[in-house]
Amino acid sequence: MSRIADSNLFDAMSHLFNIPESIEKFMIHSRSNDTNENKGVGNIPTDILDSPKEYIFYMDAPGLCKSDIQVTVEDENTLVIKSGGKRKREEGEEEGCKYIRLERRAPQKLMRKFRLPENANVSAITAKCENGVLTVVVEKHPPPPKAKKVEVTVS
C-alpha cells in the first residue's frame, strides 16, 4: 500500500471511529516523511499516554540499546526519534562456528516524528530504554491561571 493510501486510510478511519483530536494532534502524516533521506526507514510502533503532568511515549525497540537511539526536537515542536538500526549478532565461542539459520531480523533504520502540542515543555524531555521498550517523557507546562471573577457592585 502506498504512503498516500495509508494516509487516506488513516483519515477515513479517524473520521469513521471519531479518533479524538487529542490523539490526532500528535500525528505527522506519512506524506510529510516521503523524502529521499527517509527511504528504507521503518516506523516505530508507539503508544502515547496523556497524563495530567506529562506526555509519555512507549516505543518498541527490541535489540537496541540507548546508544543506538537518538531523541531530538526539531522546529521547536517536533519530537524526532531515530535509530541507526544496528544490532550485533552473537559470535560463536569457537573458531569455525557459523550460523545455520538467521530468523531474528536485524532492525532496519527506524524513525518517527511527532508534533508536540503547545503545552509541551521541550526543555524537559527524558528518555530511557529498558527491556526493549523506549520510554520518552515530555513534561507539560503548567496550565495558565484561570481568570478570577470579581463581582462589581454598583452604588
Image: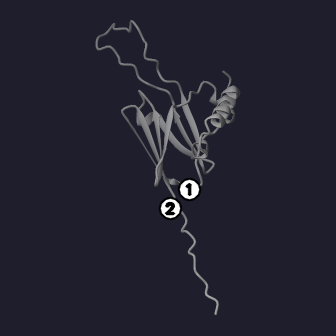
Q: Is residue 60 above or below residue 27?
A: above
Q: Secondary structure at mark 2?
A: loop
Q: Is residue 11 above or below residue 100?
A: below
Does 100 sit left or right of 118 as displayed? left
Q: CA distance from mark 2 to mark 1?
A: 8 Å
Q: Amino acid at mark 2?
A: Pro
Task: Report if the CB atoms under discs 2 and 1 are less than 8 Å apart.
Answer: no
| On-image quarter of the C terminus | bottom right
Q: Residue 47 at what x, y percent from top left?
A: 49, 37
Q: Residue 81 at what x, y percent from top left?
A: 53, 38
Which class describes the residues within 10 Å of circle 1: few (<14), some (14-19), or many (20+)?
some
Q: Which mark is residue 78?
A: none
Does 134 sit left or right of 82 as displayed? left
Q: Which mark is residue 142?
A: 2
Q: Quadrant of residue 103?
A: top left
Which class describes the residues within 10 Å of circle 2: few (<14), some (14-19), or many (20+)?
few
Residue plotted at (58% across, 39% down):
113
Q: Amino acid at mark 1?
A: Asn
Q: Secondary structure at mark 1?
A: loop
Residue at the outermost bottom position? 155
**Closer-to-camera residue (146/117):** 146
Residue plotted at (51% across, 31% down):
45
Residue where numbered disc 1 is placed? 119
Q: Earlier in the sequence, mark 2 or mark 1?
A: 1
| On-image quarter of the N terminus | top right
